[in-house]
Image: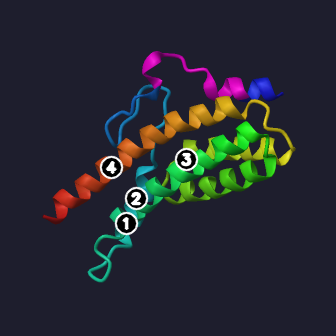
């Protein structure tokens, strides 16, 4: 079962699968790194009182994600399923908030494995998560740049 789960997330049909498409687009059969409707909803929450809400949220998410992924790598290497569960759960929630649905799903898979008391196979999943995070990071940075241009 673990090998089927790992294969689902780590087998990529082509070498360009880890390259982020331009914001709002995706390659055939590949989901966009972020859900545009969620970003749109977050942008709608901005006000004159909080004009940088989306940019601040993006910055916070990116900083936190780097830390959480590092925690996950350390927990997996140490065989600490409890710490891996907590870090994966936290990153899953944060990923959902910014619309990084594939990242959230990867975290969910890692969390499920760790909840079962196993870190077997999680290193490969964390590597896939790092690749997905890079796609999400580029897409969110593009969203942030786009918002800055519109407000100028």
Label 2 vs 3, first from the N-terminus: 2
Task: Judge from the rendering whether residue 139 lies leftward or rightward of residue 93; answer left or right.
Answer: left
Q: Classify mark 2: residues with Cα within 10 Å, few (<14), some (14-19) or many (20+).
A: some
Task: Judge from the rendering whether residue 23 lies leftward or rightward of residue 96; answer left or right.
Answer: left
Front position in the image: 64 or 95: 64
Q: Which residue range is magenta in the image?
A: 6-17
Q: How far is mark 3 from mark 4, CA to CA? A: 17 Å
Q: Going 46% across and 24% down the picture, which residue do you hit?
A: 17
* Contact between labelled residues 1 and 2, with CB atoms less than 8 Å apart: yes
Q: How far is mark 2 from mark 4, CA to CA? A: 8 Å
Q: Position of residue 13 (x, y in %)?
A: 53, 17
* Contact between labelled residues 3 and 1, with CB atoms less than 8 Å apart: no
Q: How far is mark 4 from mark 1, CA to CA? A: 11 Å
Q: Classify mark 4: residues with Cα within 10 Å, few (<14), some (14-19) or many (20+).
A: some
Residue extending furthest bottom? 49
Q: Position of residue 22 (x, y in %)?
A: 31, 37
Marker disc for residue 141:
4
Q: Nearer the viewer, mark 3 or mark 4?
A: 4
Q: Position of residue 11 (x, y in %)?
A: 61, 20
Marker disc for residue 58:
2
Label 3 vs 4, first from the N-terminus: 3
Mark 1: secondary structure: helix
Q: Quadrant of residue 60?
A: bottom left
Label 4 vs 1, first from the N-terminus: 1
Image position of 148 with respect to 47: above or below: above
Q: Which residue is mark 3?
A: 101
* Contact between labelled residues 4 and 2, with CB atoms less than 8 Å apart: yes
Marker disc for residue 56:
1
Task: Judge from the rendering whether residue 46 lies leftward or rightward of residue 146; answer left or right.
Answer: right
């Amino acid at each position: 079962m673990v090998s089927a789960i790992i294969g689902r997330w780590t087998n990529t049909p082509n070498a360009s699968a880890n390259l982020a498409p331009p914001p709002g687009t995706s390659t055939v059969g590949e989901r966009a790194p972020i859900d545009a409707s969620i970003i749109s909803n977050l942008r709608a929450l901005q006000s004159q009182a909080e004009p940088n809400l989306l940019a601040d949220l993006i910055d916070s998410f990116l900083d936190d994600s780097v830390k959480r992924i590092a925690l996950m790598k350390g927990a997996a290497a140490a065989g600490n399923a409890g710490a891996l569960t907590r870090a994966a759960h936290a990153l899953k929630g944060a990923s959902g908030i910014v619309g990084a649905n594939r990242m959230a799903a990867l975290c969910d898979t890692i969390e499920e494995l760790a909840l079962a008391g196993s870190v077997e196979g999680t290193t490969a999943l964390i590597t896939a998560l790092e690749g997905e995070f890079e796609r999400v990071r580029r897409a969110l940075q593009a969203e942030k740049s786009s918002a800055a241009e519109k407000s100028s």
